[in-house]
Image (cartoon, coloured by chain):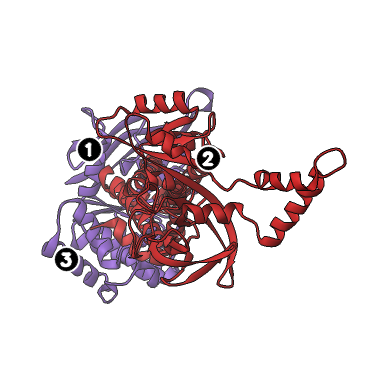
Chain colours: A purple, B red
Amino acid sequence: MAILEIENLQKTFGVGELAVNALQDIHFSLSVGELTALLGPSGSGKTTLLLCISLIHEPTSGTIVFDGETIYKNGWTGTDLRRLRREKIGFVFQTPNLIPFLTVRENVLFPQELLGVTGKKAEDRAKELLDYMEVSHRSNYLPALLSGGEQQRVAVARALANRPKLILADEPTAALDTERGMKVMALLKKIAHEYNTAVITVTHDVRMIEGFDHVYQLKDGKQDYTTTH
Amino acid sequence: MDLALRDIVHHKGKFVATIIGVGLLFAVVLSMNGIYRGFIFEGLSTIQVTSPDLWVVERYRGGPFNEQSTIPDFFHYSIEAIEGVAKASPFIFYGVERMVQGKRKRFTIIGYDVFGGLGGPQKLTAGRHIRQAHYEMVAHEKLKFRLGDTIPLGLHSYTVVGLFNDGTAPDGEPLVYLSLPDAQEILYLRDTEEIRNQRERLLKTLTEPGRMLPEQAQKYISLLETNTHMVNAHLVKLSPGANLDEVARRIEQSLYFSVYSNQQQIDLMTQGRLAMPRKQLLMFRIILLVVSVVIISLVIYTFTMEKIRSIAVMKLIGAPNRVIIRLVLEQALLMTAGSYLVGLIVIHNTYQFFPRLVRLTAFDDVVTFCIALIGALIASALGIVQALKTEPALALGGN
């Protein structure tokens, strides 16, 4: 079942002579439990595509169908987009971007609270995820006291807190050494399969995408090639 | 989950330091309010404490506080004879500086008719009122005299028989009450050597060739000496039902004096002697308040800007605007309230150490807090606008 379908997506910044086509004619679809990698050099449009899929940048044209809903149609507002993000999308960033003044446990509780899930139910979910990420012994620590790898695992736990249908990972291994990077990628693969979640990862490093279901190479805002396993 | 409190706990050192710093600034603002109020209170204190129905002073003078006024003391008989006047009493008022108990002290002497006259001290905190015509005094507690102390002033010493704590001179000096003749003597009489010298100088002038014979000159010397029977004002108490304006008009017309009601006396001071320094203090007070509001606004804005990346992350993961608004607003309010509380505690525990009266009022405290709060709300509004404008993409490391 396709969780995400993108058709003829275009994104242009600026107008007239200053117009820059950041994305042109992008097509792809993704099903639950699948892993997709977006590859490409700097400026190829990877992050712009991720921002469009994240519902942060509205595409200039084309359609995004997410979990059966056509985004930006029928008068969608920022509030609708934010609701969709907190309900159905999990984010993992280049740097962990944990909220520095919340403990590890609170960082995982926070997205649940945004959905109105509190109390024992939220605590149990946080514990389950932190156990799964093997960082539960750091539950009451502030993020600054954790290593880079631990922080990134907490970030993944936070991304999973709301049982998202899609995880967007923007170069999640960029700030880690190869060994830790491999571990994070292995974790994302495990999550995709065990939690039945679709994962899109932006990366520079082709070594990290072994076992991915789809690989999209972008070049100057266009799909250069697509590999599907 | 209270994000504002979590952030405060996380940055508690910085938060406490900021609150103490801004709190001390608020203490200065509040002390300035108190100094301003104290200045006006002290400026009008003697008028308020004395509080007769009418003040009779030298013609065309705004005395005795706003301007010098000198009139003979016996006129209270004439004033008392005017219809509508129940009582009239002489009143003398002047500042002195003397070595007392080994220390140089400044105070203001009030001389009044101690036998039932107007203008004496109101509430005593210790001892009794003056009962003798001479050599007794009632002093302000600020002078740190004790009951029974003998204080040398001029040619004589005066025993402290009573103490009080309400009422100071317009320049903040403590008051000392004496009987009218004692006060006049201290003001006008010189010591024996000085009197002898003055007499010799007068005699020499009067007996210059072509003027008087020494026997004739001797007769005039006493007339030319300083007249000690002068006062600064006469205080009037009206008969029940008497019309204040009518009685004032009668005194002005028949005795050729200027007459002011107590309220007019207050207005003279407020618009005269106190006006310029009052404006000066008011200006300083306003500037200080503006500076404080600007500083707390900057602090709040900076605190918000420091969290902008976390705010971007929150927006990216779908936090609604109200979560972000609450974070900024709650922190702004906590910081303002905390700083203000520190300032309030500091000033309410230190104001008594100021050399002059610092008069703290609940009204000023509340108004200052409201102004600070408005500044904080404006600053947090700026912070909120900035936070809401923050691109969630910032969390991804750029567009």
Which residue is located at x 52 percent, y 68 percent? B151
Instruction: Identify the mark nearer the N-term, 3 or 1.
Output: 1
Instruction: Residue A104: give x, y in percent of width and height.
Output: 29, 67
Residue A119 lies, with reference to residue B34, above or below; the image says below
Residue A178 at least partly seen: yes
**In front: mark 3 or mark 2?**
2
Pick the quarter of the image with the C terminus of chain A.
bottom left
Tags 3 and 2 on a common chain: no
Foreground of the two, A108 or A170: A108
Q: Quadrant of residue B280?
A: top right
- The residue carrying mark 2 is B72
Q: In which quarter of the image is residue B383?
A: top left
> What chain does mark 2 sit on?
B
| Residue type indicated by callout 1 | Asp
- The residue carrying mark 3 is A123
Tags 1 and 2 on a common chain: no
- The residue carrying mark 1 is A80
Residue A204 lies, with reference to residue B391, above or below; the image says below
> What chain does mark 3 sit on?
A
Instruction: Residue B270: give x, y in percent of width and height.
Output: 47, 37
Residue A24 at least partly seen: no
Instruction: Say few, some or many: other residues with alpha carbon within 10 Å of mark 2 (under 14 / 14 to 19 / 20 or more).
Output: some
| Residue type indicated by callout 2 | Pro
